[in-house]
Image (spheres, rainbow, N blue to C red):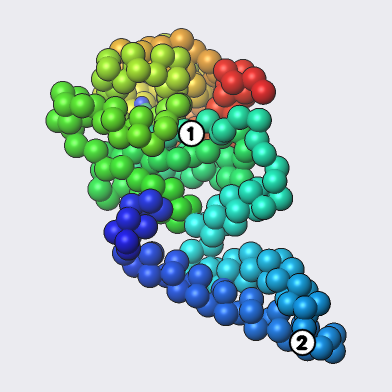
């Protein structure tokens, strides 16, 4: 049962304990607050009291669990959980189910974090899975905090085995976003997700792309070549590195004073400003309501 819950919510054992504790403490706090409020009204116990009590605890429950979840470090999980329940209770039925999206990332995950925050609470898009090839990547902690299931992948299976296609299909993934993911996407995944995989590259493609051109290697090459501008490219993924159709580009100046680190900072700012919104626009175009 507990193992099932862990898998369903994509959390570690320690988080599961904290989530269950939050449910218990939040529920008790909510019941206590409801009774105190009714005591204050002076209402006699009876049918009316019960009706008011049910209404009160329904309204107080989300506030109480969110309050308790904060010090227990589970706010991200409960924010999503409460939003989901809220949509069901209020009955705002979606015309279509949200597009379930997977983010593939290998590193710190600052882009993944912006994308997760951008779509938190969205009815159109749900970040349903974070796929990672590096057990010590920061992005795993970001996903866990946000209550998003993670999938740690192995090179052999990804490139030569099942490519994790069954896992992606089982999670209902309809769109894939690469955010600092360093392995080449196998042909089988590209065929299974035609025009449904996008990548962000930290330079103005077609320049400074290709195998080995990632992260600071890109910025070092841009500075060594004496470029006066660099930027970001969002593009569809095809079978070649950094090659698919370009969707969006934005530029920033490169000055004589820039180092690979300062340029990386400028590029990250551009990425954070544009990537989540461009993904949203693209998904809206691909899935008009
Ligand atoms: C980003 O700058 C992204 O453009 C780059 O890795 C960084 C990941 O940062 N991707 C590539 O170089 C792919 N060729 P993040 O982990 O903080 O999002």
Q: Which residue sits at x=35%, y=17%?
A: 192
* Quadrant containing the N terminus in the rendered view: bottom left
Up/down of 140 relative to 184, above or below: below
Viewer-side residue, 31 vs 187:
31
Viewer-side residue, 97 vs 259:
97
Q: Which residue sits at x=70%, y=42%?
A: 92
Left or right for 109, reference 274: left
Q: Which quadrant of the render holds ligand 1?
A: top left
Question: Where does residue 202 sit, x and y in percent of width and height?
Answer: 44, 27
Left or right for 73, reference 48: left
Count of numbered circles in the view: 2
Give SS at disc 2.
loop
Question: Where does residue 10 sit, x and y in percent of width and height?
Answer: 37, 51
Q: Closer to the N terminus: mark 2 or mark 1?
A: 2
For disc 2, the marked residue is 45
Q: Is residue 28 visible?
A: yes
For disc 1, the marked residue is 100
Give SS at disc 1.
strand
Left or right for 40, reference 77: right
* Quadrant containing the C terminus in the rendered view: top right
- Asked if marks 2 and 1 touch (Cβ < 8 Å), the reply is no
Up/down of 262 relative to 58, above or below: above
Up/down of 184 relative to 120, above or below: above
Q: Which mark is residue 48?
A: none
Q: Which residue sits at x=62%, y=40%?
A: 122
Using a 10 Å C-alpha cutoff, classify the residue at mark 1 as few (fewer than 14 neighbours), some (14 to 19) or many (20 or more). some
Question: Where does residue 280 sit, x and y in percent of width and height?
Answer: 59, 29
């Amino acid at each position: 049962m507990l193992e099932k819950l862990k898998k369903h919510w994509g959390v570690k054992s320690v988080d599961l304990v904290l989530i269950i504790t939050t449910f218990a403490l939040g529920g008790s706090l909510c019941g206590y607050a409801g009774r105190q409020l009714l005591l204050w009204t002076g209402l006699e116990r009876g049918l009316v009291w019960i009706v008011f009590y049910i209404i009160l605890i329904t309204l107080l429950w989300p506030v109480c669990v969110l309050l308790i979840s904060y010090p227990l470090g589970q706010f991200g999980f409960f924010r999503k959980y409460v939003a989901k329940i809220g949509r069901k209770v209020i009955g705002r039925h979606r015309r279509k189910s949200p597009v379930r999206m997977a983010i593939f990332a290998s590193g710190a995950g600052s882009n993944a974090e912006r994308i997760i925050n951008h779509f938190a609470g969205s009815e159109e898009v749900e970040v349903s899975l974070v796929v990672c090839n590096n057990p010590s990547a920061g992005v795993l902690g970001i996903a866990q905090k946000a209550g998003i299931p993670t999938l740690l992948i192995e090179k052999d299976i990804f490139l030569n085995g099942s490519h994790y296609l069954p896992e992606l299909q089982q999670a209902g993934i309809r769109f894939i976003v690469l955010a600092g993911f360093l392995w080449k996407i196998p042909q089988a995944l590209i065929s299974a997700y035609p025009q449904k995989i996008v990548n962000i590259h930290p330079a103005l493609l077609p320049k400074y792309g290709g195998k080995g051109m990632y992260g600071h290697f890109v910025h070092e090459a841009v500075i060594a070549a004496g470029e006066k501008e660099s930027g970001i490219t969002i593009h569809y993924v095809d079978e070649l590195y950094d090659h698919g159709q370009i969707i969006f580009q934005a530029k920033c100046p490169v000055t004589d004073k820039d180092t690979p680190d300062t340029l990386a900072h400028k590029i990250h700012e551009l990425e954070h400003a544009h990537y989540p919104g461009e993904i949203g626009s693209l998904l809206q175009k691909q899935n008009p309501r």
